[in-house]
Image: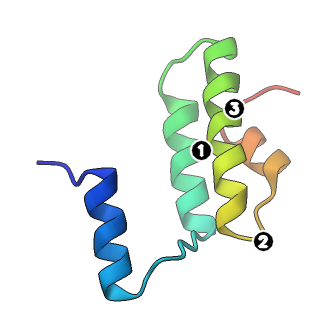
């Protein structure tokens, strides 16, 4: 059974991990999943933008353009 979003937030609050900090390896993994999934160019762009918009809040060093390139989104 997957951990629900509410349960995950509750667990983070209980353990003192209320602020999520993702790292390059997490971004690279997510981008690879988006790139390798056979989405159309439009779908890939929409999904990658959605992730990028959320991921940038998790790490001040997040590079939006680099993530988009890694996800296979053409300029």
Q: Which residue is mark 3?
A: 72
Q: Are marks 3 and 1 in contact (CB under 8 Å)?
A: yes
> Secondary structure under badge 2?
loop
Q: Which residue is mark 2?
A: 60
- Which class describes the residues within 10 Å of circle 1: few (<14), some (14-19), or many (20+)? many
Disc 3 from disc 1: Cα separation: 8 Å
Q: Residue 64 at what x, y percent from top left?
A: 80, 50
Disc 1 from disc 2: Cα separation: 18 Å
Disc 3 from disc 2: Cα separation: 22 Å
Residue at the farthest left position: 1
Q: Residue 6 at what x, y percent from top left?
A: 31, 56
In the rendered image of this protein, does residue 15 appear above or below residue 64? below
Q: Nearer the viewer, mark 3 or mark 2?
A: 2
* Image mark for residue 6: none
- Which class describes the residues within 10 Å of circle 3: few (<14), some (14-19), or many (20+)? some
Residue nearest the viewer, comparing 6 with 34: 6
Residue at point 89%, 27% (across, down): 75
Residue at point 60%, 57% (across, down): 27
């Amino acid at each position: 059974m997957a951990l629900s979003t509410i349960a995950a937030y509750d667990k983070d609050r209980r353990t003192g991990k209320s602020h999520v900090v993702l790292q390059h390896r997490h971004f690279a993994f997510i981008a690879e999943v988006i790139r390798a999934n056979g989405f159309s160019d439009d779908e890939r762009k929409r999904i990658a933008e959605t992730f990028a918009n959320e991921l940038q809040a998790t790490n001040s060093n997040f590079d939006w353009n680099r993530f988009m390139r890694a996800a296979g989104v053409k300029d």
